[in-house]
Image (cartoon, rainbow, N blue to C red):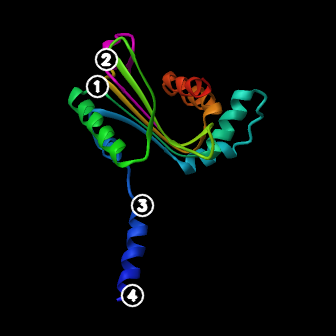
Amino acid sequence: MKKILLTAVLLSAVSLGFSQSVFDKYENEKSVSAMVINKSMFSLLAKFEVVADDKETKDFIDIAKSITSLKVFTTTDKEVAAAMGNDVTNYLKSSKLSELMRFSDQEAQIKFYVLEGRDDSHVKELLMFVSGVSKFEDIDINGKTIETVLLSLSGDIDLNKINALITKMNLPQELNKVNQKQKI
């Protein structure tokens, strides 16, 4: 009986370690553009021998060493956008993420959620969900008007260095507002 219980516990631990994110299903969705970068790629970026004369490059290298996952999903499809919204809502109910801030800019809704880290300047997970983007005619990617953006960032994220990541990886500039809010 002890062997069966031990085996069940080990199998559960292994399956939790290899579990996928609830958002991974969007990688294969035809109407979704996906960018997924895992820890090994960030580690590779951090290993490049770069002469870092500017603070932004140094900050990027520091933050790259601490990231375990970056996932960005965008869609132009309103039905898929609604499904993403439902998945975010369900994920928030089952996770320990708390709302950091939210704001509206004309018709768009931008929400940030975090899982607290080791101190006030660090988070373990950052989730950004932007909906209603299609109302802005000047925002498009490859000629497509984006409706929704879902960004998930995991690791030991230093909010003081997030701007370097945003700039170097061409991520949504709204992420800068997380650092500004944190300093208030």
Query: Which is more foreground, mark 4 or mark 3?
Result: 4
Q: Which of marks 1 and 2 is nearer the N terminus?
A: 1
Q: Nearer the viewer, mark 1 or mark 3?
A: 3
Residue 70 spot, x, y in % from top left: 49, 41
**133 in magenta:** yes
Tag 2: residue type? Ser
Dot 3 alpha-carbon crowd within 10 angstroms: few under 14, some 14 to 19, many 20 or more: few
- Identity of the amino acid at label 4? Lys
67 in relation to 12, above or below: above
Residue topped by disc 1: 76
Residue at the farthest bottom position: 1
Q: Which of marks 4 and 3 is nearer the N terminus?
A: 4
Q: From this viewpoint, is residue 183 visible?
A: yes
Give the residue at the far left of this rendering: 79
What x and y, as percent, mark residue 97?
Answer: 44, 42
Numbered label attached to residue 2: 4
Q: What residue type is labelled 3?
A: Phe
Label 1, residues with CA under 10 Å away: few <14, some 14-19, many ≥20:
many
Distance between mark 4 and mark 1 Cα atoms: 52 Å
Q: Earlier in the sequence, mark 2 or mark 4?
A: 4
How many marks on residues? 4
**How far, Cα to Cα, is label 4 from label 3?**
24 Å
**Mark 1: which amino acid?**
Thr
Q: What stretch is highlighted in magenta?
A: 127-141
